[in-house]
Image: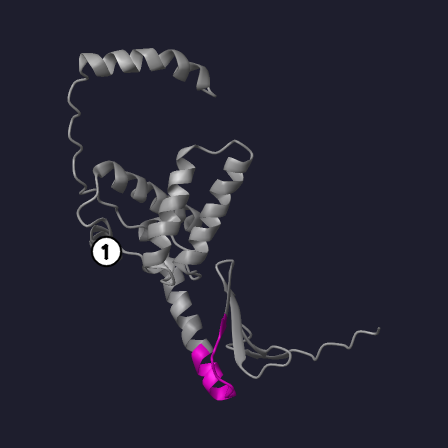
Amino acid sequence: VIAMPKPPVKIKKILDGKVSLYVKPRETIWQYGFILNGQHVRKTTKTRDFAEACSVATEAYIDARALAKAGLSVVTRSFKSVAQLAISTMQDALDVEMGKVVYNDYIGVINNYLIPFFGNRNIDKIDYMACAEFSKWRREKFKGNPARSTITTHNSALNRVFDAAMERGYITKSQIPELKNDGEKAERRPNFTEEEFKKLATWMDVWVTQGKKG
């Protein structure tokens, strides 16, 4: 079987060659692409009209240049896509027994709380207000304010996602919001009764043999 050659990609340059406009094979919508500060930006103009595509691409390039001058990332991704990268990294570490046990908790938090709420928002749009909205949503889910330890785990999981985004240039350190912990303080457990102590002491002989780490 002889493979048919792919139709050529239609490419046009604008802004003195800084921005490329192109139409992919068998498509009609113009795409644009450019490189700024070593970061590749590729997006659709969502139009078949070349003049309109030029306007969209030019505006995007000007906006990206302004971001670069301000020390901000010119490339961004959805929260969900970056969160999945963070999960993959932690799961890979767990699979080779080099990850921390708490990674399992972080993965659960990301899947059950962070992705459902932040989802398709751009990672660089997760600011203080977005985190405040998340806290309100979380209280509704928990039917009350979670414990401090729970929020600590949620904040740590969220920071894992921010770290993954920063490592890939999707955000800068200055764009990461300060995470608050207004959770409920844990109440001290009452002292063990004599009967409880005897049960614990008896079980210790069995429990200590089940440990997998020193």
Residue segment shown in magenta: 43-56
x, y percent for residue 82: 44, 54
Quickly name the residue at label 1: 137
Front residue (pair 193, 8): 193
1 in magenta: no
Residue 169 in view in this figure: no
Q: Is residue 191 left or right of residue 39?
A: left
Task: State whether residue 27 is above or below residue 199.
Answer: below
Q: Quadrant of residue 205?
A: top left
Q: Quadrant of residue 126?
A: bottom left
Residue displayed at 44% across by 61% down: 75
x, y percent for residue 7: 70, 80
Q: Is residue 24 left or right of residue 56?
A: right
Front residue (pair 67, 110): 110
Residue displayed at 41% across by 66% down: 65
How packed mark 1 is, by other alpha carbons closer than 10 Å (few <14, some 14-19, many 20 or more), is some
